[in-house]
Each structure stands twice: as structure tokens, then as C-alpha cells.
Amino acid sequence: MTAPEVSADAYLLDVREPDEWAAGHAPGAHHLPMMEIPPRMAEVPNDVEVVVVCRSGGRSGQVVSYLMNNGWDNVRNLDGGMQSWAAVGREVVSENGQPARVL
């Protein structure tokens, strides 16, 4: 799934580290760092489309595999991650008052 193909009603799950999230993320995304997924996976919805994103698609791919192996069938990886999201002109916002950017 590429950045332009993310539906407006999808649950966008950003699994990057806190500094990456603060620097820039998709508006409306939900932040849950990759290493916190196992103890917090109950927070990941299983009744709507979940699109998992990281910087370039590697970590999010691992999270998608993990969730699928644990019963989620509604999760997809965002190919190219936030780098492709930003490259196609999708909005990026920051939490730290600085211009948004993808780390």
C-alpha cells in the first residue's frame, strides 16, 4: 500500500520512536512505538483498516507480521513509510513547534 492509497477512514499507526514522531508525522496518526506493540497490542483496533507506518517501511512491515501472527487480519504496511508519504506531498505535522520533517 502506498501513501496516496491510504483511505481517509483508515487507522494510521505510526510505530517510529518518540523523537521521529515529534519531528513529523501524518495528521491524525496514532503513535505506538514498535517496541511497545507486544504489551500494548490490545490498543490496535481489529474492526477497521489499520495502516502501519515507520520511516521507510521496514519496522512497520515487522509490526504487520507480528500483528497478523497474533490474530489481526486488518493490518497493512505503508510501503516506503513516512518518506514516501512526504515525497508525494501528503501533509506532515510536528509536535515540537519546529517545521515538520521526517527523521
Image: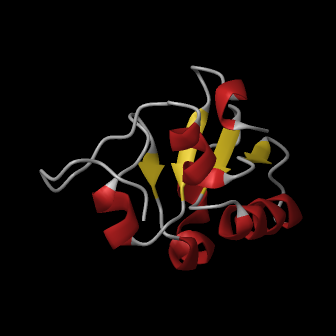
The residue drawn where x is 77% and y is 63% is: 61
Q: Residue furthest top?
A: 8
Q: Residue 74 occupies which quadrant of the picture?
A: top right
**Relative to 25, is 87 on the left or the right?**
right
The residue drawn where x is 58% and y is 21% is: 9
Q: Residue furthest bottom?
A: 35
**Residue 31 position within the rendered picture, expressed as x and y whole percent measured from the top left:** 43, 56
Count of marks placed on residues: 0
The residue drawn where x is 60% and y is 63% is: 41
The residue drawn where x is 55% and y is 79% is: 35
**Residue 10 position within the rendered picture, expressed as x and y whole percent measured from the top left:** 62, 29
According to the image, what is the colour scheme of the structure?
secondary structure
Q: Which corner quadrant holds the C terminus?
A: bottom left
Q: Residue furthest left?
A: 97
**Figure check: 14 above or below 85:** below
**Residue 46 position within the rendered picture, expressed as x and y whole percent measured from the top left:** 70, 42
**Figure check: 47 above or below 64:** above
Along the line of sight, the residue nearer the viewer: 61 or 50? 61
Q: Is residue 77 visible?
A: yes
Q: Which corner quadrant holds the N terminus?
A: top right
Along the line of sight, the residue nearer the viewer: 98 or 65? 98
Q: Is residue 44 visible?
A: no
**Relative to 20, is 37 on the left or the right?**
right
**Figure check: 32 above or below 85:** below
